[in-house]
Image (cartoon, grey):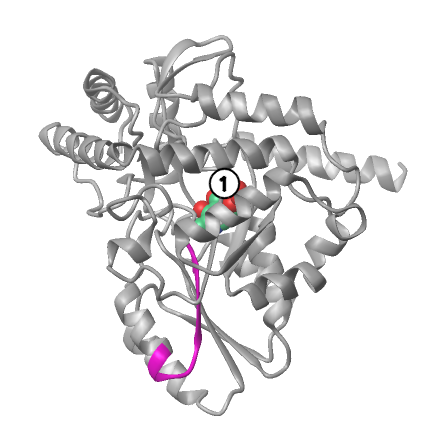
Amino acid sequence: MTAGERLTAELGAELDEMEAKGTLKDLRIYESAQGPEVQLKGLGDVIVLSSNDYLGLAGNPAVIEAGVQALKKYGAGTASVRFICGLFEPHIELERDLAGFLGTDSSLSYVSCWTANHAILDALCNKQTHVFSDELNHASIIDAMRLARPGGKSIYPHSDMAALEAALAERAGVARKLVVTDGVFSMEGDLANLPRLVDLCEEHDAVLILDDSHGLGVMGETGRGTAEHFGLHGRVDIITGTLGKALGGGAGGFVAGSSELCRVLEQRSRPQLFSNGLPPTVAASARQALIELRDNPHLVARLRQNTATYRGLLTDAGFDPIPGESAIVPVLVGETTRAIEISRVMLKDGVFVTGFGYPVVPEGTARIRSQISAAMEDWQMERAVAAMARAAVSVPV
Ligand SMILES: Cc1ncc(COP(=O)(O)O)c(C=O)c1O
């Protein structure tokens, strides 16, 4: 057996093991655009509760048209990285509008928020840097810290502000302190304690980096995110976020902050130097999504109302969702295999929602995570909750 054949056999065994444990993920194929109700190959029409398309903009005609026009005008891209071949007008417009929306001087786009988080931590860390990170931060932040290799790091228990304060006090002499947090935590749907984080950073001379991927378009009166929700718009040093959720649902990410920060990132953050920029069609669609959000603040209000309706329906059906203010509504169901089975049963019943289990969440806290959209109608949420109730009964604990 060659080394290549041996590797293939080992990987095959790994897949068999996942299948035997019931944890193998099978991916769905869409035959329509994303929305509250879609067509899935082999399954027909289903209601979607597993997308981050919080504002229903992924299939919005103006968002689609902006991408089409940019594709026609600019083609697929420069076939190079930005520092060699430059960028297109849609990048400039998107980055300017994102900064305006978030109340920062400047912003810089990347092909994903995963990349943006890697870029910022890598660019800001050196041996004189200490990073303080919430234990439930997104995987991109965890991996970014590993790659950036700061002088030191403290992982504080989830939202434990006393632990963070103690860690900051212990590192009083460190030259550069970076506190990094998700705005909305994706598995629980809860919010970072931003008021306390802002205060602690001010008191301890630390820079705050907020990944607001699940907060943008969702939190705050006008969807400007977790900072707006807490009345702290403009008070966060650096914001990262994705364009792959509420802001168009395609792909892309960004860093927003001072113009010096964005210029330095453009000069020397590794993904800018060694990887292509955002395709212009995606930049144009994301910018249009931002315009839709800015011109239609009722979308944010509608999302909030839908989330309250959905929570109410769940409670009436006997479920006990994890409390929270975001558009993420998790219901704990016990073991991983049960969560996966419930989501399978629900899919057959016409509702597409994902079950999350170990290792994404701790053992025994597997969950059905619903994500609500402003585009959902009441009847769709009613049908979804009825399907969850039937599935929960049919899959034993
Ligand atoms: C908090 C957070 N940060 C970053 C990301 C990564 O975003 P992207 O898909 O743009 O890489 C996600 C996506 O799941 C996320 O939830």
Judged from this view, the residue extending furthest toward the bottom is 173
Query: In the picture, residue 180 is in which quadrant?
Result: bottom left
Tell me the residue at 40%/42% (across/down): 357
Whether residue 243 is visible to the viewer of this picture, yes or no, is yes
Which residue is more in the foreground, 82 or 312? Answer: 82
Query: Would residue 29 appear left or right of 384 to someone viewing this image?
Result: right
Mark 1 residue crowding within 10 angstroms, few (<14) / some (14–19) / many (20+):
many
Tell me the residue at 45%/26% (across/down): 58
Q: Is mark 1 within 8 Å of ligand 1?
A: yes
Which percent across, then down, holds residue 390? 22, 19
Query: Would residue 197 appear left or right of 278 to someone viewing this image?
Result: left
Query: In the picture, residue 208 is in which quadrant?
Result: bottom left
Check if residue 156 falls in the magenta segment. no
Above or below, comparing residue 21 to residue 226 in the picture: above
Q: Which secondary structure, mark 1?
A: loop
Query: In the picture, residue 375 is in which quadrant?
Result: top left
Above or below, comparing residue 203 to residue 34 in the picture: below
Which percent across, then down, holds residue 49? 34, 27
Which percent across, then down, holds residue 214? 38, 45
Q: Quadrant of the N terminus?
A: top right
Tell me the residue at 79%/42% (across/down): 80
Q: Which residues are magenta?
A: 202-212
Query: Would residue 354 appear left or right of 5 to someone viewing this image?
Result: left
Q: Which residue is mark 1?
A: 243
Tell me the residue at 41%/63% (across/down): 135
